[in-house]
Amino acid sequence: MAIDAKTVGELRERTGAGMMVAKKALEEAGGDMDKAIEILKEKGAAKAAKRAGRSTGEGIIYSYIHGTGKLGVMLELQCETDFVARNEQFSELAHKLAMHIAAADPQYLDAESVPAEDVEKAKAGFAAEAEGKPEDVVAKIVEGKMDKWLAETVLLKQPFVMDEDKTIETVLTEAIATIGENIRMSRFARFNIEGGM
């Protein structure tokens, strides 16, 4: 099937994929745009997984101050090379992530950084709320509420404020596939003067 340049251009605009990669995905999908996007996502996730072990010794410290001047975020976003660290696409990613942190107020970077005592305290609270129900039901309630709690407090698990169909982890995975290097957030800080947003 012949794929026209306009369709390739549309797919590139929607996904950020390179021209030949976009064309190949459209050919593989028989010209179906949505199927081509899914193919690119799968390939992107596979590429990201391959790059996950690579060292991220470069990057930027990005700062974002909300318009009121009472809310700010500092974010350390790492990549493999200084070339990517100076790339406009990388800076845009840092900006979007910092804006998300300002809006969503995550407490922890990833699930591994949540202190064990906070996890136990949350579990105990959820179990107390479900008291009086059968033990297996309590366990399921606690598990569901823990998943929800982690999605609210852990940055990588939060729904992205600019596209709630994606988590921050998904946004990073897509950026890795598009930019072509391992990218990771190593830390962040959110500063807020009460009533600042």
Image (spheres, rainbow, N blue to C red):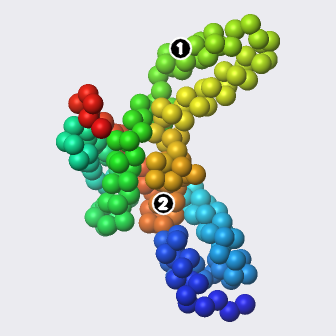
Query: Closer to the observer: label 2 or label 1?
Result: 1
Indicate the amino acid at tag 1.
Lys
- Which residue is pictured at 79% across the width and 17% down the height? 136
Q: Is residue 78 visible?
A: no
- Which residue is pictured at 52% across the width and 77% down the height? 12
Residue 108 at x, y percent in the picture: 43, 32
Residue, disc 2? 176
Instruction: Tell whether 8 sits left or right of 87.
Output: right
- Which residue is pictured at 69% across the width and 8% down the height? 131
Q: Quadrant of residue 85?
A: bottom left
Residue, disc 1? 121
In the rendered view, tell whether residue 146 sits above or below residue 55: above
What's the distance in space between the residues labelled 2 and 1, CA to CA?
A: 35 Å
Which of 62/130 is in front? Answer: 130
In the rendered view, tell whether residue 149 sits above or below residue 21: above
Which of 184/166 is in front? Answer: 166
| Few, some or many residues within 10 Å of mark 1 (<14, 14–19, 20+) | few
Dot 1 lies on which element? helix
